[in-house]
Amino acid sequence: MVLSPKITARFLLVAAALVCGIGMVGPFQGVEKNFVPADKAAHFIAFYGLTVLMMAAFPKNRRLEITFAAVMLGASIEVAQMFTHRGVSFSDLAADAAGAFAVWVPMWIQSLRSPPVVERRRRASDRVPETSAA
């Protein structure tokens, strides 16, 4: 049985979200320094990856809304850190948002370069020869 890319992305998203959530809220403070020397870089990389997986897992949703959902996830993690006696940092949230928007911005720029979907459909329908039902 072969899983579709969307289902695979959803499994990976759940696994990555659990790892990030436990790493950011759990008792493993500073463990990211074993992988990435800077805390803000770790936040950027984590939310870049989470946003990519979210977009792959939910391809029909709007990309900007997915990006904002990733930023809200980062904000909720910062709020959760208040209750676990860890420092709340707006710079961590800014790094989370930068990672999420680093995924969205190139996609947005590409959408400016290509014609809207309605225009592409019209052009495609102009090229298809009509068949008469005679």
Image (cartoon, grey):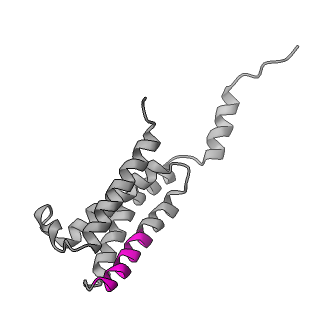
The quadrant holding residue 7 is top left
**Where, by quadrant of the figure, is residue 45 drawn?**
bottom left
- Please provide percent x and percent y for residue 47: 33, 63
* Residue that appears at 52% across and 63% down: 65
Tell me the magenta residue range.
Answer: 71-84
67, 88: nearer the viewer? 88
Q: Is residue 5 left or right of residue 126?
A: left
Residue at position x 29%, y 64% in the image: 20
Q: Answer with left or right where residue 79 lies relative to residue 33.
A: right
Q: Residue at x 40, y 46 (%)?
A: 9
Closer to the camera in the image, 129 or 25: 25
Rendered view: 117 above or below 1: below
Q: Nearer the viewer, residue 117 or 115?
A: 117
91 horizontally vs 30: left or right? right
Total numbered labels placed on residues in the image: 0
Residues 110 and 57: in front is 57
Q: Give the residue drawn at x 15%, y 68%.
A: 31
Give the x, y percent position of residue 126. 70, 31
Residue 87 percent location from the top left of the image: 25, 85
Q: Residue furthest right?
A: 134
On the image, which quarter does residue 134 sit in? top right
Task: Give the prevailing secondary structure in the magenta stretch.
Answer: helix
Q: Is residue 120 magenta?
A: no
Please say whether residue 83 is one of the residues in the magenta stretch.
Answer: yes
> Which quadrant is home to the N terminus?
top left
State whether residue 133 is above or below residue 80.
Answer: above
